[in-house]
Image: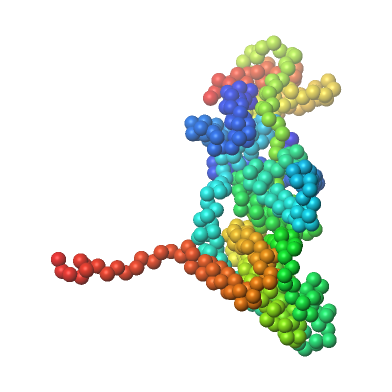
Amino acid sequence: MQRDTLQIRTADNVGIGYEPAGIASRFLAVMLDYVIQAAIIFFVFIVVQAAAPDASSTTVALLLFILVPFIVSTGYFVVLETATSGRTPGKRAVGIRVIRVDGSAPQLTEALVRNIIRTLDMPLGVVAMFINSQSRRLGDLAAGTLVVREKTAYSAPPAMPPVLLRTPDAGPQIEGVERLGLTEYSALRTFLSRYGLTPQQRQHLAVEMAKRLHERLQLPASAPERQWPAELFLERLYLQLAGRLQAAP
Amino acid sequence: MTIDTFVLRRQQGWQELERCIATARGGALRDVSAKDLERFGILYRRSVSDLAIARRDFPDEDITEYLNGLCARAHPLLYRGSPLRLGSLPSFYATGLPRAFRAAKIYVVASLVLSLAGVLAGWLAVALRPDLAATLIPHSLFDQMARGEVPTGGLDNAGFTAGFIIQNNIRVALLCFAGGALLGLPTVYVLLLNGWTLGTLAAAVHRDGFDLPFWSFIVPHGVIELSVIIFAGATGLMLGDAVLRPGLLSRADSLSRVSGRAVGLAVGAASLLVIAGIIEGYISPSGLPEAAKYFIGVASAILLYSWLLLAGRPQRSRPQMSLERVTPA
């Protein structure tokens, strides 16, 4: 299933498709990151309390309340986006990541630019994200980055050959198979792999498809293949085509 | 080739690349041996060409989407800018920052002019309408200073003052940079307001005749602090200019090109605010004689600007007097 994708052409001159992350998932990711920041700040408080329980002078306390939150909130995104190539814990949990517009990984420069501008983006960037087709906020525009979805399928889906019920083998050689190619093979494979059709629907589609394939094969009107039941014809044709194509490199 | 044979023949390579991605993500690529790295590149290029084949021959199959995801995950691991090395930090301060400063000098001048305009406007406002001085001076924090009560000898909370001021000023400096993304309008506002605050305060102090203690409080840290805000403002103006006059690029492209260059100056300059904040916490309000405070201010100015203007210039080869050349052989 193909959703709206942005094609980024790589150095190998093949376009890799990316799906830009929407406002909702990015909002969720940033909220998770803020929760983690709060946890870090809280942790530092606990550690300082435990390490120096009697250091309750105003200077120490106020430094803690001002400097620690400042350093954590400023540094968190810059450090983590640099270290993880744009996959902060919040983004990873939601399944999104930052990339540069050329598809490469963001570095310190990009992390700095997009996160310094984050302060402006909390109120205003949402408007930019609404307007921009790739949901880029101001910080993304300035840094030359965008946030995309990471695909979660981590193993190749097994190729499932269709189950054939009507013929045990490829049957007699069909005239003109060499006229057909991958397109017809793919169409046949898709049709034969389909589940959930009633026998009538299946029969109807098969007749339509067989008719067109007769044309493409340029079968003479007297050819015996025209007399086969449509579904049997399609299955035999599929097997013969597969055999031919598999033999070819 | 049918889809079944395609998957069967190529699957092993994809699985191997999958394992490479997992290792590279677990640690960093730098832990991967040169041989494995080469293998990674080969596997990646094979998978990308498989993706191209799958796009052409099996555009609607799951396998195409899987290959796309595989390549999308592998690509940023192999393609990236030069990584950050802590070892490059000294050379950034030794040459990179001064060069970035000199490259941005037009914007620094513009930023300075805006700040001076704020100072002038503030001064004139207080001088012309002394009755409104109390409302014209924005920072209530500085009310006591306007009455000539310059804080001296109050070092009890020096650490807190320094810490608070450092984080506040860094926030302002970074906001100046960020404002560039909005045509630099927030930047212009911050620069004018900063100048206005100083101008109104100075005028009020001058009216009451407390000039010397007031400036002895401002100058030690003010030289660096005000300079940095002006530099940060310059980076914001740079960005704003890139958006307003993108030339042949799109506005977004122009912005991202310039911001990559400007961010080093903004962050490098903001780091100097740590020095300014420490001076402001520990020296400016201290009981040191005024002459010493002025000396610190002037010394910081000389150090700051000789570094920014002179460091990292290309070495000119000096004309060498060579007797051997002059004397005929």
| Residue B236 image offset from top left, x and y in percent | 66, 66
> How has the structure been colored for display?
rainbow
The quarter of the displayed image where residue A44 is located: top right
Query: At 54% from the left edge and 41% from the top edge, which residue is drawn?
Result: A12
Q: Quadrant location of residue B158? A: bottom right
- Which of B305/B290 is in front? B290
> Foreground: A246 or A128?
A128
Placement of B295 over or under A224, stated as above or below = below
Residue B128, given in percent of the width and then of the height, sits at 77, 88
- B94 above or below B143? above
Q: In the image, is B163 to the left or to the right of A8?
A: right
Residue drawn at the location 54% of the way across and 44% of the way down: A11
Which is more toward the observer, A45 or A22? Answer: A45
Residue B23 visible in the displayed image:
yes
Q: Which residue is drawn at 83% across and 20% down?
A: A199
Outermost residue toward the bottom in this view: B128
- Is A37 above or below relative to B306? above
Count the labels in the image: 0
Does the image show residue B167? no
Q: Find residue A208 and report its image quarter.
A: top right
Whether residue A170 sits left or right of residue B320 in the image: it is right
| Quadrant position of the N terminus of chain A in the picture | top right
Q: Position of residue A246 (x, y in %)?
A: 58, 21
Image point (75%, 19%), residue name: A231
Q: Which residue lies furthest to the top in this view?
A: A168
Query: Residue farthest to the left?
Result: B329
For the residue pair A185 and A98, the one nearer the viewer reads as: A98
Residue B321 percent across, percent down from the top left: 27, 69
The relative height of residue B156 versus residue A77 in the rendered view (above or below) is below
